[in-house]
Amino acid sequence: MKDIIEKLKTEKSNKKITNAKLSEMSGVPLGTVNKILSGATKSIKAETLNKLKLALLLDGDGVNAISPINTYGFCKVGAYTPEIVLASPEDNANRIIDGVKIASEKGVSLLVFPKLCLTGATLGSLYYQQALIIKAGASLLEIAKATKNLPVISVIGMPINVDGKLYSVGAVIYKGSVLGFVPENNPDNKVFSTFNGAKTIDFFGGFIPFGDLIFTAENTNGLTFKVAFSTDLFAGDIKGDTTLLAVLSATPETVCKTEKIKNLIFSLSYTKNSGLILSEAGYGESSTDCVYSGENFICERGKLLASSKKFTSGLTLSEIDVDYLISQKQKIVKTSEDIPNMEVFFDLQVNSFTLTRNFEKTPFVLSDSDKMQERAELILNIQANGLKRRVEHTHAKALVIGVSGGLDSTLALLVAVRTMKLLSRPLKDIIAITLPCFGTSSRTKNNAYDLCTALGITLKEINIKNAVNQHFLDIGQDEGVHDVTFENSQARERTQVLMDYANKVGGLVIGTGDLSELALGWATYNGDHMSNYGVNSSIPKTLVRSLVEYESSRGNALLKKTLYDVLDTPVSPELVPPKEGEITQKTEDIVGPYILHDFYLYHAIKRCSTPSKIFYIAKNTFKNEFSEKTLYKWLVNFYKRFFAQQFKRSCLPDGVKVGSISLSPRGDFSMPSDAYSTAFMKDLEGLDIDN
């Protein structure tokens, strides 16, 4: 303990730092600092020791030379497989240094190397040679020295001798210092020992944490990581709850290895809400009995972000959304959790980088057409079974649907048909009502008729012009003024007719509004906003389109023709008179493109991203389709409408949830109707926007 205190005092003296300044830099209370440096404290907590040690690595002002930059919560990570030289730590150290330099140029903050890469993972009895172990330790210090000016945390596999026992460890180095050693829990080589717990060891005169460690970047909003090994994955022995997991591997290549590894890392990263970086041993390992492919993986909460080709070396990289992972962890109420034996603290200096990972333009629609067909069938069956249960419970004699000839009512009709088939009931029990008024176009009206004919359901037409005109007289509305009263009067009249007709026939009114409309509040309160059961309430507009496309490939000739035309028709509530028979009121001209709003909705609700971060991602995703000015305009509109229209979502009718997002107040999302959007709007202020 005296040696530790003397080292701290010497370093403090060299940097001309007072006890008070050291306390401020480390976060350790001044009284504790005074006691430690005076020798009054006989036992120092490992956490306190590490804080003091880290503080003394910083410059005299207590700050890093380069301050962290705003990366929107992303952390660029990498897995690097060097071509090693067996039993030559010095050669391998040079190759590792090259790897760190390459990664630094790419903006990588956390870089993972393979298991035992400093010596080779296939040395067998050579690990007993102390000359090799000593040289490996000295080479690690050379790596730390050579990379001290690079803002990269490196996790390097190596053997180490502790208290007369050999361990396979992941050595974590950063800014010229060894932050800690994490031993392998389940070594597959009988040479190495296992270790439970954590302690501080003397490593070439330095005092380094050893054991079960969690590494925490104190100057970030929750970036933590653990070091593990592929053998721990196979044994199901991964403890702790961190945002990132660095996995060192030296697993021989076999015909079934890849799928097994993928299943394990996808499952682990999903259940732990973590990002996972696995670095695999590659060329240079002994081929006496096996070969090693160097196939690396980076994944985020069960999603593969990047991988390398088999039998290649070098860097695999991507960006893990740490803020997203933290948001998902916060949604889980924990009653207990693994407590780390030791936590190692450091300040992360974030390097500048370019976002390389891709985000889906339509996150609710799978890009793989075959998988999307499977998904579509499942979604339609979820909708149909939800409605089936409601029909049985209410003993409904009919399903009443307002049919406009547009996408949403078309999907609702298709779901109703499935439901009646599940119930073995005649399709004539589905009563589709078309309710033409001032804005109805001949195209949509004809599609409504053709659709009902093709499906074999009952169709009624109830023209509401006279009723709406009477209502205008009652309230003193000028028919020539096409304002919100003009529009909403039609929408509410349609809903009144549907509700009353359903009462007449003992039926249920099936809601047609979708998730995108609910997010934007694009519905008339107590008009199309209301129904007895909303089958589309958790289906965003882009997914509605995809489901109708799926059904268009399965029907008779008339149904196919009609569905294709429905898909080709501009989205419109048709509440304003057409011009020369053509639709003039186009929804996407008013509220914005649904492909953008669904993208914004997914990242705002599912990934809990900030508005500025969503804009940053959208710029990369839609750079060839929309200008930054357009993206910004509709993002602002999205947030304004989302907050202003919550009152409509607070009293939604029941509706089945089909995906990861629902805005039902009885489901996953709760929000007061009088919440302000001020903080979200301010987050968008001051962004650089190109035209």
Image (spheres, grey):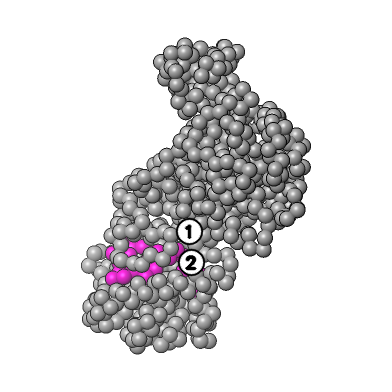
Residue 326 vs 522, above or below: the answer is above
Label 2: few (<14), some (14–19) or many (≥20) C-alpha neighbours in 10 Å = many
Number of the label disc, if any, that sits on residue 543: 2
Q: Of label 2 and label 1, which has the lower sequence position?
A: 2
Residue 324 place in picture, x, y as percent:
48, 47
Q: Residue at x 50, y 49 (%)?
A: 237
The amino acid type of the residue labelled 2 equals: Leu
The amino acid type of the residue labelled 1 equals: Asp
403 relative position to 588: left or right? left
258 relative position to 440: left or right? right
Residue numbers of the magenta segment: 521-548
Along the line of sight, which residue is nearer the eye, 212 or 513?
A: 212
Along the line of sight, which residue is nearer the eye, 107 or 686?
A: 107
Q: Residue at x 28, y 78 (%)?
A: 392
Q: Residue at x 31, y 57 (%)?
A: 665
Tell me, yes or no, whether the highlighted magenta stretch contains residue 592: no
Task: Please give the residue where the numbered disc 1 appears in the rendered image.
Answer: 598
Label 1: few (<14), some (14–19) or many (≥20) C-alpha neighbours in 10 Å = many
Calculate the distance from the C-alpha at mark 2 to the C-alpha at mark 1: 9 Å
Tag 2 secondary structure:
helix
Question: Could you say which quadrant of the image residue 119 lies in?
Answer: top right
Residue 220 place in picture, x, y as percent:
50, 35
Along the line of sight, which residue is nearer the eye, 456 or 315?
A: 315
Tag 1 secondary structure:
helix
Majority secondary structure in the magenta region: loop
Tell me, yes or no, whether the highlighted magenta stretch contains residue 543: yes
**Residue 688 visible in image:** no
Cβ atoms at labels 2 and 1 below 8 Å apart? yes
